[in-house]
Structure formats: structure tokens, C-alpha cells
Amino acid sequence: MKPTRFIDSMNCAIEGILYAAKTQKHMRHHFLMAIILLLALLVMKVSAFEFILIALSISLVLFAELINTAIEVVVDMISPEYHPLARVAKDIAAGAVLIAAISTTVMGYVILSRYIFPVYKEALGMVGTPSEIGTIISLLIVIIAVVILKSVAGKGKPFQGGLPSGHSAVAFSIATIVSLSTMDPVSSLLTLALAVMVSNSRLLLRHHTLREVIYGAGLGTSLTLAVLFLFKTFA
């Protein structure tokens, strides 16, 4: 029955949000990112206007995800069997969420980059620009470490399968080197994004598990930083 009291309408709305959070993985991810972003805004002490813009952007993504969930439920109820138009309806609804997420990302980048980039650039400067020899040696050490760890684990080839992921290790090692070489936050973020895409491709191809990819990324980043820091210390 349609609720007649305001409190009943509120309860229905809250139940709808809880249903989306319980059943939709992406909704939970959006809520988690919203919490992280709001905490970051608190730490960085952004202006009231900037806070309003980002809060509205977050609300837009959550709203789009709720509408997407509602459309999926209705489509499943009307067409429980596969139908091409049902797929189109779900794809369009998912596209709306994607557009909202992209616009929120752009908004967050434009506002937060003014606060984050100076700190990020200072952090990169603490390690220093790597030398040519340091760059080559760090990459070689990462590759050798991957081979050794895979031989100890007894699973996979140097660059296919096994623990850790060789592709992820090398990709994040290169991203670290580029970040320190350029000292440019934008270039650093772009190369890190490429490293993430390389790592994700290993998951999509089912050559590695998420744990193997994370270990590879951590190995490549940590070893590269350690080697370059040693070169800077003893140069």
C-alpha cells in the first residue's frame, strides 16, 4: 500500500537505499569513495563553495546508481528471460551512472588538484630525480626479484601466471621511475593509470589473481623506490 504518513515515506526511501547498497556492489563502492572523498575535503579544508560542488557531484553519482538499480529491478520483473531490449535498457541506465561518475571525477580533479599536487610534488622531490644507471638497475632488480619469487613459489612463468604478477611489477616500477623523473603530478598520475590498466588486463585475461597483481604492484614500487633512494644516498 502507498504510505500515507511522511515517516512511512521516509522509511520506504531508506529501505530502497539499503536494498541498493546490499545488492549492488557498485553502490557500495560509491558509498566508500564518497566517505573517503568527504574525509579528504575535511583534511584539506576546502572552501564552502568547493565543498558544495563536490557534495552535489557525489549526490549525482549516488542518485544515478539508485535509478540504475530501480531500472534493473523493473526490467527483471517485466522480462525475467533474456531480451535484447532489456539489455539495452540496462546498458543505458549504466551509461547514465558512467557519465555521472566521469563528471564527478573531473570536478574532483579540478578542485582537489590545487590542494594535492603541491604536496605530491614535494613528496616526489624527497626521493629525487633518478639517474640513468639507477633507472636501469632498479628495473633489472625488479625483474630478477619476480623471477626468483616465482621460482620459489613454483608456479607460473616469468611473465605469465604465478606470484607475483611480473607485468604489474614492471608496470608500477616504470610508473615510479617516470613519476620521479618528471616530477610532474599529471604525468605521474597518467603513468600510474596505465600501470593500473596493465594490471587489470592480467585479471581480465585470468592470468593472475587480485592478490598476485597487488603483490606485483607493491614489489615493483617498493623495490624501485628503495634502489633509487640508495643511489641518491651513496651517489
Image (spheres, helix red, strand yellow):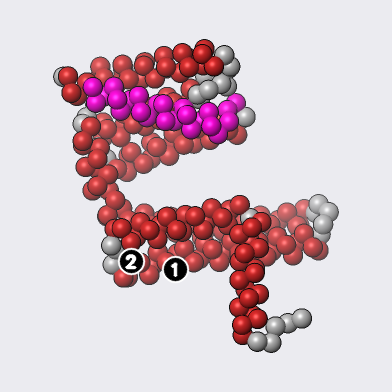
Q: CA distance from mark 1 to mark 2?
A: 10 Å
Q: Answer with the quarter of the image where residue 230 lies.
A: top left
* Residue that lies at the very extreme toward the bottom in this rendered image: 4
- Percent x, y of residue 202: 56, 30
> Which secondary structure lies at badge 2?
helix
Say which quadrant the N terminus sits in. Answer: bottom right
Q: Identify the residue shown where x is 31% and y is 58%.
A: 43
Which residue position is annotated with label 1?
Answer: 56
Residue 15 vs residue 149: left or right?
right
Residue 152 vs residue 95: left or right?
left
> Which secondary structure lies at badge 1?
helix
Q: Identify the residue shown where x is 31% and y is 17%.
A: 136
Which residue position is annotated with label 2?
Answer: 50
- Percent x, y of residue 91: 66, 55
Q: Answer with the quarter of the image where residue 64 lies.
A: bottom right
Asked whether residue 130 is drawn in magenta, I would say no
Which is the main secondary structure of the residues drawn in magenta? helix
The magenta-colored residue range is 207-230
Does residue 102 appear anywhere in the picture?
no
Q: Foreground residue, 14 or 140?
A: 14
Q: Is residue 205 above or below residue 48?
A: above
Q: Amino acid at mark 2?
A: Glu
Q: Foreground residue, 121 or 40?
A: 40
Q: Identify the residue shown where x is 35% and y is 28%.
A: 222
Say which quadrant the C terminus sits in. Answer: top left
